[in-house]
Amino acid sequence: MSGPEGKGIVLVSCVKSKQPKRCAAAEMYISPLFKKKMVYARSLQPKRIFILSAKYGLLDPTTVIEPYEQTLNNMSATERRAWTKAVLNSLQEQADLNNDHFVFLAGARYREGLLPHIRNYSVPMEKMPFGKQLQWLEATHP
């Protein structure tokens, strides 16, 4: 996130484990991995943090949502392309895809369609299985 402009956008993917009730997006996802990703995201002091939701697309963490059961893994290629297009449209309203730096704390399915449209990005936990991601996050921010 460092740099002369101090710009940065962190994108955190949703998870399966959710609250059983309507609440803010940042509180909806209750897995230890998601919680650690949010702690790490905040520690970067980015300009914005967004949650990538299979159902809702690009979410501000304060947006109140209903619980749901949906994953990009169960979507067809056509449905994933539509999801990607919607997320990119929302991102373009909130960020500069050419100049902002994006940090992806999200799996390959969530990144694959977005990365070709974003100039500056990093994927700190790329290719790490969930267990290793949790270990890395705990070592980075115990």
Image (cartoon, rainbow, N blue to C red):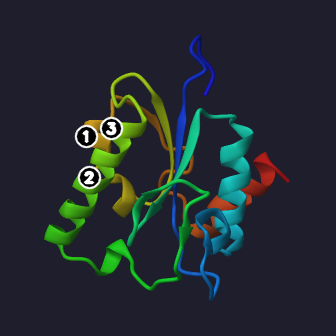
How much space separates mark 2 and mark 3, taking CA atoms?
14 Å
Image spot of residue 44 (x, y percent): 68, 36
Q: Position of residue 89 (x, y in %)?
A: 28, 46
Q: Residue furthest top?
A: 4
Element type where label 3 sits in the image:
helix
Would residue 78 appear left or right of 7 to someone viewing this image?
left
- Check disc 1 and report the residue beneath it: 116
Q: Earlier in the sequence, mark 3 or mark 1?
A: 3
First in sequence, mark 2 or 3: give its number: 3
Residue located at (55% from left, 24% from top): 7
Q: Is residue 129 left or right of residue 40?
A: left
| Residue 106, horizontal then vertical, whole percent | 48, 57
Name the foreground residue: 126 vs 5.
Answer: 5
* Residue type, numbered disc 3: Gln
Asked if residue 59 is positioned above or below residue 102 in the image, the reply reads below
Q: Amino acid at mark 2?
A: Gly
Of residues 56 and 39, the one nearer the viewer is 56
Q: Is residue 136 visible?
A: no
Spatial CA span between label 1 and label 2: 7 Å
Number of residues whose C-alpha sits closer than 10 Å to that of mark 1, classed few (under 14), some (14–19) or many (20 or more): few
**Which residue is identified by label 3?**
92
Q: How many marks are shown on the rendered structure? A: 3
Q: CA distance from mark 3 to mark 1?
A: 14 Å
Nearest the camera: 5 or 23? Answer: 23
Residue on which the image places disc 2: 113
Given contact means CB atoms under 8 Å apart, are the residues at marks 1 and 2 in contact? Answer: yes
Q: x, y (%) of residue 26?
A: 64, 63
